[in-house]
Amino acid sequence: MKMGAVFPQTEIGDDPGAISAFAQAVEDLGFDHLLAYDHVVGASAAGYGKEQLRGPYREQHMFHEPLVLFGFLAGVTRRIGLATGVMVLPQRQTVLVAKQAAEVDVLSKGRLRLGVGTGWNHVEYTALGKSFADRGRYLDEQVALLRKLWTEPLVEFEGEFESVPNAGLNPLPRQRPIPIWFGGMNEKVLKRVARTGDGWLPLFKQFEPGMSRTLSSEMEPKAIIGRMHGYAREAGRDPAAIGIECRISCFRQTEDDWQRNAAIFREAGATHLSLVTMNAGFESVDDHIKALETMRAAARD
C-alpha cells in the first residue's frame, strides 16, 4: 500500500512556517501523499442541536481551504502527492473548482488527486448558496463536467445544474484528467465509485482497545470492498483499476491496533493507507511527526 499522512487541519494552527515544516517533514520521511480534510465554514455549536448537525466539526475547529493550501504546499515540497479527502464538491461552483484544481496540478507538476463527496453539513450549503437536497445528483454532473474541462480546450456543456457555453480553461492541468476519488460508505457511493471513480476513500470501523475483535461479515472491509468490485464488474470495469484508500488513527489506538488494522485493510485490497494524528493531544509539529514515524513503522508490510 502507498502510505500517506493526514494534514492535522484542526491542530496545525495558522503559522505558515509550521505548515511548511509539517509538509516537508512528511515528505522527507518518505510518505507518498498528504491528505487534507475540507470545511469552508463551521456551524455554531450553540445555534444547532446534535439532531441537526451529525458531523464532528463546529465553528471553533480550524480548516485551511485545501486547494489554496495545496497551492502553497506545491511551492515548498518537491515530490509528495496532494490529495483532498474529501472536498465537499456540490457546495462549490464546478468551473471554479476545475480552474483551481488545474492550477494546483500545474504548480505541483501533476501531484494533485481530488477526493470528493457530498458532505453532511447543510449549514455550509446554505452559506454557499447551494442546494443540500440535490447534492448527490449535482455531484454526478459535476464530475462529468470537471473531466471535460480538464481534457478539452473548449467545452460545450448543458446539464441540469451547470451550463458552459463554448469556453475552456487555460492552462489545462498536467494530468488530463486529474484523478477523482469518491468518499463515503453507503451503497450509492459504492455504485458511484464502481461506475466512474478513479478511487474510493471509505471510512471503515477500526479496532480499539477493549473492542471485540470480530465484525459482522457484512461490515468487514473485505466484504464491502468486494461489493464495490462486483458493481465495477457489472459496469464493465476492471476492479483492479480503482484505488482504495483507508485510514488508521492515532486516537485511542496502540501499535498492535495500527498493525492489525493495516493488515486487515491490506488483505481487503486497499491500495493506499493514510495515518491520522489529530485528536491525540499533540501540541506541536514535532509531536505529530514523531507519531507518524511510529505509526508508519507499525503499519508497514
Image: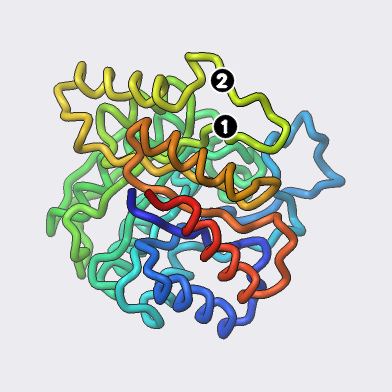
Residue at x 28%, y 63% (from the top left corner): 102
Q: Quadrant of residue 4?
A: bottom left
Q: Nearer the viewer, residue 140 or 32?
A: 32
Under mark 2, the amino acid is Leu
Q: Quadrant of residue 232?
A: top left
Residue at x 65%, y 55% (from the top left corner): 41
**Contact check, label 1 and label 2, Cβ < 8 Å:** yes
Dot 1: what SS? loop
Check residue 215 in the rendering and tell me which mark sits there, or answer none. Answer: 2
Residue at x 45%, y 78% (from the top left corner): 24
The correct choice, above or below, for 258 with respect to 22 in the image is: above
Q: Quadrant of residue 53?
A: top right
Check residue 95 in the rendering and tell me which mark sits there, or answer none. Answer: none
Percent position of residue 282, x then y: 71, 66
Dot 2: what SS? loop
Percent position of residue 281, x then y: 74, 61
Residue at x 33%, y 34% (from the top left corner): 269
Under mark 1, the amino acid is Lys
Q: Nearer the viewer, residue 278 or 200?
A: 278
Evaluate whether residue 142 shows in this view.
no
Q: Residues within 10 Å of mark 2 (few under 14, many from 20)?
A: few
Nearer-N-terminus badge (1/2): 1
Between label 1 and label 2, give the one nearer the viewer: 2
Q: Residues within 10 Å of mark 1 (few under 14, many from 20)?
A: few
Q: What is the spatial separation of the Cα atoms under label 1 and label 2, in whole angstroms?
A: 9 Å
Residue that badge 1 annotates? 205
Percent position of residue 43, x then y: 73, 48
The correct choice, above or below, for 32 with respect to 15 in the image is: above
Q: Nearer the viewer, residue 17 or 274?
A: 274
